[in-house]
């Protein structure tokens, strides 16, 4: 199985996840989340396949998340479409890394979850 690995190369969690993929022999296509930011349509599709709340796609520890006071916007009731449109404006707003496969999407690196899905 080959998957899409969406990452920010300077992110320590992404580096750890990439090393894990390499060590386990998982084939992947690498995509830089800032140079090739996911589109709103991609995010909507990934969200549907992930089974996660749309909030889980936001990089809540990022400076831009805090600067734009996105938590308050989410709490005020942003629609999923508004969330996807906002996320598509800047890759630094998106939680990473992301694994995109035909059957599933994983957001953030949790080793046990990745092992269950990818191995």
Image (spheres, rainbow, N blue to C red):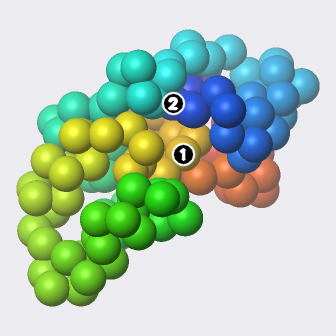
Image position of 60 with respect to 17: above or below: below
| Residue 50 in view (yes/no) | no
**Residue at point 31% right, 32% down?**
38
The residue under label 1 is 96
Q: Quadrant of residue 73?
A: bottom left
Quarter of the rendering containing residue 61: bottom right
Seen at 13% across and 81% down, the residue is 77
Residue positioned 73% across, 22% down in the render: 26
Density class for disc 2 (Cα within 10 Å; few <14, some 14-19, many ≥20) is many
In this rendered view, identify the residue nearer to me: 113 or 103: 113
Q: Which mark is residue 34?
A: none
Q: Position of residue 108 (x, y in %)?
A: 59, 52
**Which residue has dot 2 on it?**
6
- As drawn, is 72 to the left or to the right of 118? left
Q: Residue at x 41, y 69 (%)?
A: 66
Q: Position of residue 8 (x, y in %)?
A: 57, 32
Contact check, label 1 and label 2, Cβ < 8 Å: yes
Q: Judge whether residue 23 can be spotted in this image.
A: yes
The vertical placement of 99 against 112, above or below, is above
Instruction: Classify mark 1: helix, strand or loop.
Output: loop
* Mark toward the start of the polypeptide (1 vs 2): 2
Task: Decide: is 52 above or below 49.
Answer: below
Image quadrant in which the C terminus is located: top right
Classify mark 2: helix, strand or loop. Answer: strand
Between the residue at mark 1 and the residue at mark 2, the CA separation in whole angstroms equals 7 Å
Q: Nearer the viewer, residue 8 or 112?
A: 8
Residue 62 place in picture, x, y as percent? 50, 58
């Amino acid at each position: 199985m080959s998957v899409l690995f969406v990452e920010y190369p300077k992110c320590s969690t992404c580096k750890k996840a990439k090393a894990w993929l390499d060590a386990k022999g998982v084939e992947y296509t690498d995509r830089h989340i800032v140079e090739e930011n996911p589109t709103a349509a991609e995010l909507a599709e990934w969200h549907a396949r992930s089974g996660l709340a749309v909030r889980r796609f936001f990089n809540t520890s990022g400076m831009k998340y805090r600067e734009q006071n996105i938590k308050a916007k989410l709490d005020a009731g942003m629609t999923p479409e508004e969330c996807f449109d906002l996320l598509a404006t800047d890759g630094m707003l998106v939680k990473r890394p992301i694994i995109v496969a035909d059957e599933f999407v994983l957001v953030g690196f949790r080793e046990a979850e990745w092992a269950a899905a990818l191995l």
